[in-house]
Amino acid sequence: MRIGWACLLSILSLSMVFADDKKSDPSQIGDRDVGKGLNCYSIDKEIAMGKQMAAEVQRQAKMLDDPIIGEYVNRVGQNLVRNSDAKVPFTFQVIDDDTLNAFALPGGFIFVHTGLIHTAETEAEMASAMAHEIAHVAARHMTRQACRAQIANIATIPLIFLGGLPGYAIRQGAGAAIPMTFLSFSRGFEAEADYLGLQYLYAAGYDPNAAIDMFEKMMSLEKRKPGSIAKVFSTHPLNEDRLRKTQAEIEKILPQKAEYIVNTSDYMEVRGRLLAMENRRKMRSTEKDSNRPVLRHTPGSGPAPGEPGEDASDDRPTIKRRDLIE
Ligand SMILES: [Zn+2]
């Protein structure tokens, strides 16, 4: 018996429909090969490259030296990974950088900026950004994109892999140290990372609407303080369209649950810890600022506003004001 071309094509397109259906069914997570597609790198090679790049990020970026925050972010991340299609082991690390960013390297190396924790008011919001990055890894977007790029520019792409990363200035943030080839994904890959990430967020028990809250926060932050979102992160097109699409997907493919995780006391503690750390740092830098108003003790003057009114000596404080030049 012979199968005609038309028949073969219809079988092929039918199987693609099934594959697409699976991708829209969160109950099938883990049982769907979302990373398939043309890839010129083996998974082992992908992990090895990611490891090399992660070591470079650690060398160039200011890693957050706080085991409590680090352990917590890793715990949230691993829980999302368990509810994802990813097939590789993951590590999650925190970079001490107040720009809003999170990024993934090939093979499961995720970096979260402290700026993400600063901006996200709930664990679910933070998790939504992390789930998006996990989805990029699960779907092997970096290597698939690199393979595409290699076809277009075969001379340069392998150098990035083999010769290490170019040494960009650290002030541009760690994201800049990673070749843009990896991180400015095609629109199609971005949409897919949104789609899969949303499902992982939901499967891990979080309220999927947190993804929308996070988009809204990012959009308003970018409006209020342009540049506070890392360039790499904002290449994920941030617009109403992306927001509406996510809203529609929540309604279409995620069956409503009785309960969702929105926030946890662990997140509130960790975020409080980070904000307190940032405040202490701000205060220290204000103290160092030589243009600040100086307290000077002058005999005979009354206590300065806000100062305890001690009168035991003639050495009473007064405020000598200077114009602040910023
Ligand atoms: Zn993305």
Image: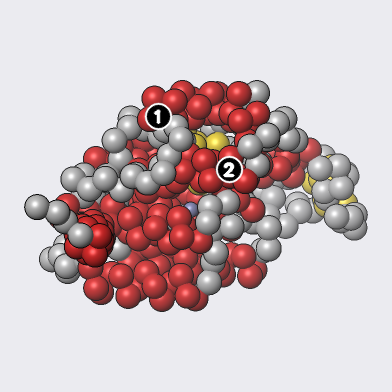
Under circle 1, the secondary element is loop
Specify whether 179 is left or right of 251: right
- x%, y% of residue 122? 38, 56
Residue hosting label 2:
151
223, 191: nearer the viewer: 191
Three-letter code for the amino acid on which mark 1 is drawn = Ser
Q: In the image, what residue occupies the spot 34% across and 44% down?
A: 35
Q: In the image, what residue occupies the spot 37% across and 69% down?
A: 246
Mark 1 or 2 closer to N-term? 1
Three-letter code for the amino acid on which mark 2 is drawn = Ile
Residue hosting label 1:
42
- x%, y% of residue 287? 75, 40
Specify whether 56 is left or right of 303: left
166, 174: nearer the viewer: 166
**Is there a contact, CB below 8 Å, between mark 1 and mark 2?**
no
Quadrant for residue 234, please give it: bottom right
- Judge the density around disc 1: few (<14), some (14-19), many (≥20) Cα neighbours within 10 Å: few
- x%, y% of residue 112? 49, 42
Specify whether 191 is left or right of 9: right
In this view, which residue lies farthest toward the left? 1
Specify whether 50 is left or right of 312: left
CA–CA distance in space, label 1 to label 2: 17 Å
264, 228: nearer the viewer: 228
